[in-house]
Image: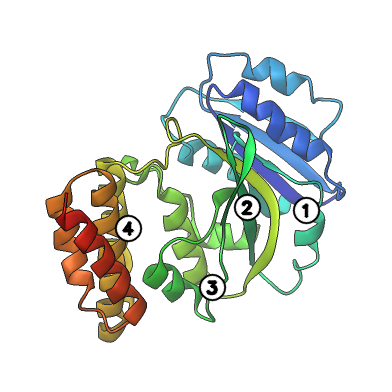
Amino acid sequence: MSILFSVIIPTYNRSSRLKKALDGLTSQTFKDFEVLVCDDGSKDDTEAVVNEYRDKLNLKYIWNENWGGPARPRNIGIKESRGEWLCFLDSDDWWYPNKLAACAKYVVDYDFIFHSVDIFNAKSNTLTSKKVGRELSENPFKDLILNGNGIANSSVVIRKTICEKIGEISEDKALVAVEDYDYWLRATQASDRVKFLNLSLGAYYWDGDSNISQISMDRITKEITIFDKYIANLSAREQKQATYIFNYKIGRYYGLLNNYAEARKYLSSSMLSNKISIKIKSLVFYLKFLLK
């Protein structure tokens, strides 16, 4: 009997938050799915937590020696999956009950589905006013290069044949924390049948301390690596505009790290953009950092 969705959860020493992710799966109104918890060598009670859900979910637990990031456990989950569609869910995120039901409506006409997710303050356990996820243009690959990653990993539902076509998620350690962005770029090169659901169908915690996506010099280096890898796929005009937008983002990152000299360098470049919004934003932050 075929399964429509395979839910792939990489995890490492996050048993307490994993429980919330699994609770969200037991509450799904759409039931045609399997769950693969891919453990990257946890030393806590992750396996015991998973065992609590054996009778509640169609569940498989896979433990491997620690690799040091989500890419390898996700790839293991992809290989072990039996579903026609793959759903990625981080172990510290969770879905609302209508997540799979909402996505199932679009599996005939699209190859890549994603949606908005809410952001919760981890310390106060309260919903913030911010969301992650945005509509992409008719050329989703170019949109992702020009405007950056607008896709939350835990919102993605992708046809398995697309994953088979583009191959594994990169296990290059230089891309840890941005390997998902790299994968979306490869996926949208393979198919532009992308659907964004402007609905919050899940959530994640932001604590500013332990999240792997926190701004850092390492993060900046990885963002530059991704940009340099794909920029040649754009026309000369698009490359110029993409560079201005990218420099604005990197300039802000440097400012957040209190490296104001680098911030001003990148922001001064982005002020050359013919996109008024980028010029104004860059100028505002340039002047702000000039006073630091």
Whether residue 88 is visible here, answered yes or no, is yes
The crowding category of the residue bearing disc 2, from other C-alpha atoms within 10 Å (few below 14, some 14 to 19, many at least 20), is many
Identity of the residue drawn at 31% across and 81% down: 238
Residue 117 - label = 2
Using the rendered view, name the quadrant where residue 231 is placed: bottom left
Q: Is residue 170 left or right of residue 92?
A: left
Q: Is residue 56 left or right of residue 182?
A: right
Task: Provide residue 18's location: percent of width, then percent of height.
Answer: 65, 28
Q: Circle 3 — which element?
A: loop
Give the amino acid at mark 1: Leu
In the figure, 2 relative to 186: above or below?
A: above
Residue at x 70% of width, y 27% of height: 19
Give amino acid for label 4. Answer: Ile
Location of mark 4 (residue): 226
Residue 40 at x, y percent in the picture: 51, 27
Asked if the residues shown at circle 2 and circle 3 are in contact, with their CB atoms under 8 angstroms apart, the answer is no
Mark 1 Cα shell of 10 Å, populated few (<14), some (14-19), many (≥20): many
Q: Nearer the viewer, mark 2 or mark 4?
A: 2
Mark 2–mark 4 distance (CA, rounded to whole Å) = 23 Å
Residue 232 visible at all? no
